[in-house]
Amino acid sequence: MKKLVVFTGAGISQESGIKTFRDSGGLWEDYNISDVCSPEAWKKDPELVLEFYNKRRKQALEAKPNRGHEIIAELEKHFDVQIITQNIDDLHERAGSTNVLHLHGEITKARSVGTEKVQTIGNKPIFLNDLCNSGFQLRPHIVWFGEDVPNMLIAEDIVKTADIFLIIGSSLNVYPAAGLVYQAPEDCPKYLVDPSIDIEAKSINNLTMINEKATIGLAIVASILEKEYL
């Protein structure tokens, strides 16, 4: 069974109604990114940070997996699928995918600021003085701007083993995650699905570019994979 590594960005969740900070009319417009998404913001005003992520959690859990998420889950019938995602929602899991690595954390989990222990909170909000069992404040289990990405080395090792590499909903502009494509074997077929493809992507070996939103582009890729490998 071929190893299919799928790297997903904000574009796939966007079609489920989860907007990014680059979109107009979304949750981010009510906040300055530097005030809610960094260790400095947490030190300055943890209550504001918790308020923001409580809203994001509610938004994410109200969203439903779209056809793009479902297609990726269905590919597990024919491929050894490993998802690496920049997204903090659980839409891949709810669509039925079983192997998902979250690079930037998970909105349904909280982390102790003292022990770093992670716990699942589901749809529960986090407030000031919500403590872990050891008595430390809980924070969102999210990688903020300026923090290390703990799962990056794991992701790189996964990509190095890919027989096929599929990138969905990412313009390959956000590093370090965008550099994962260069970890894939040179002869590995690569597919990039995004409405806005960076000019630099055109220099990547064995890359097929599909300028479509995730749901449409994934249907195209699934058809190609079916003809090529099944």
Image (tube, rainbow, N blue to C red):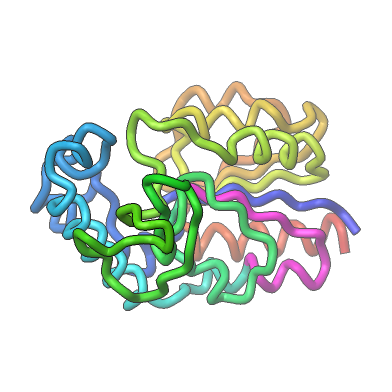
Of the 4 image quadrants, the one containing the N terminus is bottom right
Q: Residue at x 69, y 40 (%)?
A: 190
Residue 45 located left or right of residue 181 = left
Q: Residue at x 22, y 61 (%)?
A: 129
Q: Is residue 166 magenta?
A: no
Q: Nearer the viewer, residue 52 or 50?
A: 50
Q: Is residue 76 magenta?
A: yes
Q: Residue furthest front?
A: 134
Q: In the image, is residue 46 above or below residue 72?
A: above
**Camera sees residue 11:** no
Of the 4 image quadrants, the one containing the C terminus is bottom right
Residue 11 located left or right of residue 84 = left
Q: Residue at x 40, y 52 (%)?
A: 112
Q: Position of residue 40 (x, y in %)?
A: 22, 32
Q: Nearer the viewer, residue 174 or 56?
A: 56
Query: In this picture, which residue range is highlighted in magenta?
Result: 72-86
**Camera sees residue 78:** yes
Q: Nearer the viewer, residue 157 or 191?
A: 157
Q: Position of residue 109 (x, y in %)?
A: 43, 62
Residue 192 located left or right of residue 127 = right
User: Quarter-wise, where is residue 208 in the image?
Assistant: top right
